[in-house]
Image: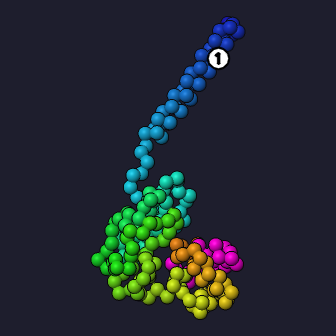
């Protein structure tokens, strides 16, 4: 004896109830997920980043790369109005070898900036002074002759680099060279390892 199928009305009722249960589960799981996301607090302190390239920072935040005589060199996320002292603090403070006479701790930092805290005995200067033995060309101090020692940098490009520096102030990162007329990504890639700020 075969069982007869349920009447169409009862079948529609079962389908409606099943669909309502599925929709309710989807809405509930979405609400729980949204509640979890909203419950996560935004970072309140600087966090070292593991990648070499900073991603686009959110409004009100900036990325800085802190190197040199600091306890924990790395990439840090700071408030948009941060000073150099905040970047150094985010990197765990300075080491015993730090030469703070070569660093303006009150200076405002900019997004994408690389900050090098010099070691004692390094040449005095701006916060981009490298440790002894670093033979890279300092974009903020090099004269035309020094710039011309770089691959594919002739007199005209060296003059443009110096002119850009005089008009715009210090290079904050090596990537600022892209703003110099005549320097593109390919040329920058060829000289990146030979320059610093």
Whether residue 86 is in magenta: the answer is no
- Is 136 in front, or is 51? 136
Can residue 4 be seen in the rendering of this structure? no
Quadrant in which the N terminus is drawn: top right
Callout 1: helix, strand or loop?
Answer: helix
Residue at the location (34% across, 83% down)? 120
**Mark 1 packing: few (<14 Cα in 10 Å), some, or many (20+)?**
few
Residue at the location (62% across, 90% down)? 148
- Residue 57, compared with residue 72, is above or below; it is above
Q: Position of residue 147 (x, y in %)?
A: 59, 88
Q: Position of residue 7 (x, y in %)?
A: 69, 7
- Is 134 in front, or is 164? 164
Q: Position of residue 183 (x, y in %)?
A: 67, 77
- Residue 86, compared with residue 151, is above or below; it is above
Q: Tell me the magenta residue range.
A: 176-197
Q: Which residue is mark 1?
A: 15
Can residue 35 be seen in the rendering of this structure? yes
- Is 137 in front, or is 110? 110
The picture quadrant where one finds residue 145 is: bottom right
């Amino acid at each position: 004896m075969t069982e007869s199928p349920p009447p169409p009305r009862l079948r529609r009722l079962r389908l409606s109830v099943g669909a309502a249960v599925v929709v309710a589960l989807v809405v509930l799981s979405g609400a729980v997920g949204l509640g979890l996301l909203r419950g996560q607090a935004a970072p309140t302190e600087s966090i070292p980043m593991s990648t070499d390239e900073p991603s686009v920072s959110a409004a009100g935040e900036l990325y800085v790369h802190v190197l040199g005589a600091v306890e924990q060199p790395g990439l840090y996320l700071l408030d948009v109005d941060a000073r150099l002292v905040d970047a150094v603090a985010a990197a765990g403070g300075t080491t015993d070898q730090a030469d703070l006479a070569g660093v303006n701790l009150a200076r405002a930092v900019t997004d994408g900036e690389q900050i090098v805290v010099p070691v004692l005995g390094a040449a005095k200067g701006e916060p981009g002074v490298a440790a002894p033995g670093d033979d890279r060309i300092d974009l903020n101090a090099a004269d035309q002759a020094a710039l011309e020692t770089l691959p594919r940098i002739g007199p005209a490009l060296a003059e443009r680099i110096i002119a850009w520096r005089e008009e715009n102030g210090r290079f904050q990162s090596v990537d600022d060279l892209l703003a110099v007329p005549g320097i593109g990504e390919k040329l920058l890639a060829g000289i990146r390892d030979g320059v610093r700020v």
